[in-house]
Each structure stands twice: as C-alpha cells, then as structure tokens.
Image (cartoon, coloured by chain):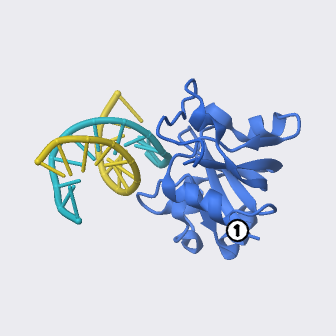
Chain colours: A blue, B cyan, C yellow
Amino acid sequence: MNYWLMKSEPDVFGIEDLKNRPDQTEPWDGVRNYQARNMLRDQMQPGDLAFFYHSNCKEPGIVGIMEIVRTGLPDPTQFDPDSDYYDPKSDPANPRWYLVEVRFQRQFRRTITLAELKSHPELAELPTVRKGNRLSVHPVSPAQWEFILGLE
DNA sequence: GCCAACGTTGGC
DNA sequence: GCCAACGTTGGC
C-alpha cells in the first residue's frame, strides 16, 4: 500500500468533477512524462491512496483524497487524433502511455495550500515543494502523508 | 553522445 | 503574462 500525490488543473478536471462523476471514478489520462508514466505503470497498486492536488490555478494545493482502483491500463487518448493527448508515435501493439483509474474518497474541508506545505520543515523533501520539480505524479512517504492529514 | 533549440509545467 | 526549470527533439 503506497501513498501518492497527483496534480490536475481544476479548470480542466478538478476534485469537484471527480466527486460529481456518476460512480465518482475517472481514468486519470493525459500523463505524458516518462518518470510519471513509470510510476503509474509499474508502482501503483489498487488500494493505494493519493492526494488530489490542484495546480496552475489561483490557490494551488491539496484538496482531497482519492483511491487508486485500477492500474496498468493503456491510455486510450494517445491513439485518438482528436485528443489533446494524441501521440502519433505510440504503437497500439506497444502502448507508450498508461493510466490508472481513480475513485473519489473525500474532499478536505479546506485547501492545504502550496504556501502552507512549503512552510513546514517536515515536508521539505516532498517533491511538490522542491524547487523545479514538475512531476505530476509522485510518491508521498507515510510520514509525509500523516503529517499532511494533520494539517487539515 | 553532445548540445542547441524548442516546448511544457506551473508558480507567481 | 512572465519566466525559471526541466524535458524532448533532432542535427551533427
């Protein structure tokens, strides 16, 4: 059982959108970074939990928790010429990009902002607060996970 | 295999 | 909208 943090732009897909899905479940598509892909494909397990992080918005930060329900699925958007995530170089016989399916678990009472995350020395090693880190998916240690839960 | 040019991310 | 940081591409 592992912990993760996954970023999404709320203007594109925010936690409200996940909560409002009929089954509160969504394929987490569009990851186009090899490091993040490797984690999605090789390390994530059903039952893992992930923080939902809102990026590139007015108040970036962690807004809730979701559960990883299915893993190791080829991302269909890579084969769709009409998709923003289309990748003409990906071979259907050997897909380049993968996704996991996530399910809404709960929304925090408030956003735990990036500024707040940065203010705690206990979180100095959290990739999201490290300078220059842009990974949209990354692991969270059990200690970091518990600490962040305590901030809510 | 190097590296310049270009593209993307994402905070501010 | 700016721009720093980082990733990818492609010529050589």
Q: In this orientation, which residue lies closer to the viewer: C7 or A91? A: A91
Q: Residue furthest top?
A: A82
The quarter of the picture where the C terminus of chain A appears is bottom right
Q: Quadrant of residue A28?
A: top right
Q: Amino acid under label 1?
A: Trp
Residue A67 relative to residue A42: left or right: right
Which residue, given by chain and number where applicable, does mark 1 sit on? A145
Q: In this orientation, which residue lies closer to the viewer: A86 or A39? A: A86
Visible in this render: residue A110?
no
Q: Quadrant of residue C10?
A: top left
Q: In this orientation, which residue lies closer to the viewer: A9 or A149? A: A9
Element at badge 1? Answer: helix
Q: Position of residue A35 (x, y in %)?
A: 51, 59
Q: Position of residue A136 (x, y in %)?
A: 56, 52
* Residue at 55% across, 56% down: A36
Q: Quadrant of residue C6?
A: bottom left
Visible in this render: residue A47?
yes
Q: Position of residue A27 (x, y in %)?
A: 73, 42
Q: Position of residue A133 (x, y in %)?
A: 46, 58
Q: Around disc 1, counting alpha carbons within 10 Å, would you say few (fewer than 14), some (14 to 19), or many (20 or more)?
A: some
* Residue at 55% across, 26% down: A81
* Residue at 59% across, 39% down: A9
Q: Is residue A145 above or below residue A19?
A: below
* Circle 1 chain: A
The quarter of the picture where the N terminus of chain A appears is bottom right
Residue A32 relative to residue A69: left or right: left
Q: Is residue A124 above or below residue A53?
A: below
Q: In this orientation, which residue lies closer to the viewer: A137 or A93? A: A93
